[in-house]
Image (cartoon, rainbow, N blue to C red):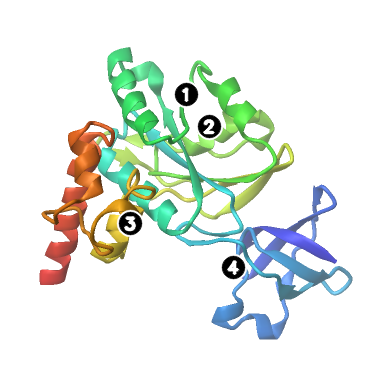
Amino acid sequence: MVGRIVSSLYGKYKIFVNNQILTDVFTLRGNLNFKNDKVIAGDEVEFDFDKRIILKRLNRKSYLKRPEVANIDYLLIVSSLKEPQFSFDLIFKYLTYANFNNIKTMLIFTKVDMIDDEYIKQIKKIFANLSIPTFFVSNKNRQGIDELKDALNGHIFCLMGQSGVGKSSLINSIDKSFNRTIGQYSYALGRGKHQTKETILLPYGQGFLVDTPGFSSLDLKLNKIYLAHYFPGFGKHYINCEFSNCLHLSERNCQIKQLVNQGIIPKICYDYYMKLIQELENEKKR
């Protein structure tokens, strides 16, 4: 039989097949324990139902190392507008990470009930210029939830974001039957407290929502050439730079800098690109 891994914890696996999650827990056949054949949430596998053993991992169409998940179609980057404080820096890192892994993205901004409309308009304009679908929601009063639900069907959508931004609350707002455990925001620490401990696929519509553990930082581990190619908004334009290895710094005939000067690429994007370039330079010196 063939099914999909919906959870993986301490060598025990749950499998989704024929529109249901099997209540039995499966383990791996011995030769699947090697690193190259590692089985994770999202993987499609062949399994022996009678023996409760996973026999083979099928080829993946996508893979993310953090959060560790396979075969997703979209990365839903979830960011709160307050508590924890909104961070352009982290958003641009997430988007670059998704572009590098060739995964489509949507942006979901939570806690819109805690922020003024003018700031929301500024954020909306920036990401509209980058052609990234954005949703502004409130888990408290359900603002924007129905619009988001209409967009989540027929694919595997993986939620990614800091602890405390409201990922689990958002999933519960989309479908209260999921009943995900909700964490609390720590004012003393200035961040959310971890609640989701594992990556888990939740059947929704004709696809899945993937709940993942939150984290407060992301190390891209990219060199400057990759950053210049995969930074959000640069992808379809950098090929028009005069030099194929253009870093969009001081090179002549740089298409990216021209578009920034023309206002087609928002200047704030370029400013954060420069900040990431500087971070890579500092890491190199260490």
Tell me what residue is drawn at x 22 percent, y 59 percent.
246
User: Mark 2: which amino acid?
Assistant: Leu
Labels 2 and 3: the sequence-earlier one: 2
Question: Mark 2 near mark 1, Cβ–Cβ under 8 Å?
Answer: yes
Q: Report the amino acid beneath label 1.
A: Val
**For numbered disc 2, what is the local secondary structure?**
helix
Alpha carbon separation for disc pair 2 and 3: 32 Å
Mark 1 vs 3: CB contact within 8 A:
no
Seen from the viewer's position, the closer of residues 90 and 128 is 128
Sequence-first tag of 1 and 4: 4
The C terminus: image quadrant: bottom left
Q: Is residue 72 above or below residue 53?
A: above
Judged by depth in the image, the label closer to the viewer, 1 or 3, is 3
Q: Amino acid at mark 3?
A: His
Give the Cα separation between the discs numbered 1 and 4: 35 Å
Circle 4 residue: 10
Q: Quadrant of residue 227?
A: bottom left
Q: Which residue is mark 1?
A: 137
Of labels 2 and 1, the one closer to you: 1
Q: Which residue is mark 3?
A: 229
Q: Tell me the crowding category of disc 2: few under 14, some 14 to 19, or many 20 or more residues within 10 angstroms, Cα based.
A: many
Task: Estimate the x, y position of residue 44 in percent, counting from the top left.
Answer: 71, 63
At 24% across and 46% down in the image, what residue appears? 256
Q: Residue at x 43, y 36 (%)?
A: 132
Cα gap from disc 1 to disc 3, whole angstroms? 31 Å
In front: label 4 or label 2: 2
The residue singled out by tag 2 in the image is: 170
User: How many angstroms separate mark 4 from mark 2 (CA)?
Assistant: 27 Å
State the CA–CA distance, disc 2 to disc 1.
Answer: 9 Å
Counting residues from the start of the chain, the first of labels 3 and 4 encountered is 4
Q: Is residue 189 visible?
A: no
